[in-house]
Image (tube, grey):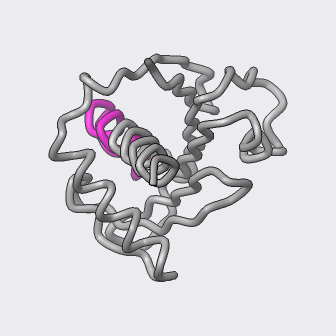
Amino acid sequence: MYITHINIHTGRLRRSTRDQVPDAAVLAAQSWIFSALSGGQPLPMSWAGPYHGTARIEHGGLLVTVYSETALPVLTIRVALRTRHAALWPASETNARKPQEPWSNTTVVTPEALPAPADLIVIEDALMWAWKEMRTAAAGQ
């Protein structure tokens, strides 16, 4: 199983498998998502370095906005696990082709504040797999 991730600005597609993501990052992201969904203020993202973020459920999927230390929005990450979450795809995006679910995408808001590419992948993948595991566990109850 994999989740397809697309960077909206570059059009770069990559496939992420769960075994590529450290368990500690996924567990930290799950805890963060749980806390972030119940509050509206940006919360520190312990596995993501100096970043903070907000999370909400939109169209049944996960929408996360990541902020820099200076409170600038840096990027938005969307995670759609099922076809019914397809409306989460950015309405303004007409150039990138939406992959089949499950997918995640990143929209860069402040390029100069982006983390290093390897750190960005950890942030994206931890959020994707944390959300997937949380939703799978919820469906199994």
Q: Is residue 35 magenta?
A: no
Q: Can residue 38 be seen?
A: yes
Left or right of residue 22: residue 138: right
Q: Does the magenta stretch include residue 117?
A: yes
State which quarter of the image contains the C terminus.
bottom left
Residue, x 52% and y 27% (percent of image)?
5
Residue, x 36% and y 21% (percent of image)?
17
**Residue closest to the eye, 139 or 22:** 139
Residue interval drawn in magenta:
112-124
Single out the residue that lies furthest toward the front. 141
Percent across and percent down for residue 55 are: 51, 65
Label count reads: 0
On screen, 63 above or below 128?
Answer: below
Residue, x 49% and y 25% (percent of image)?
3
State which quarter of the image contains the N terminus.
top left
On screen, 86 above or below 34?
Answer: above
Percent across and percent down for residue 115 are: 32, 44
Left or right of residue 88: residue 50: left
Percent across and percent down for residue 41 are: 46, 82
Left or right of residue 88: residue 12: left
Q: Can residue 114 be seen?
A: no
Residue, x 51% and y 81% (percent of image)?
40
On screen, 131 above or below 102?
Answer: below
Residue 100 placement: quadrant: top right
**Residue closest to the eye, 100 or 137:** 137
Percent across and percent down for residue 33 are: 40, 62
Q: Main secondary structure of the magenta part?
A: helix
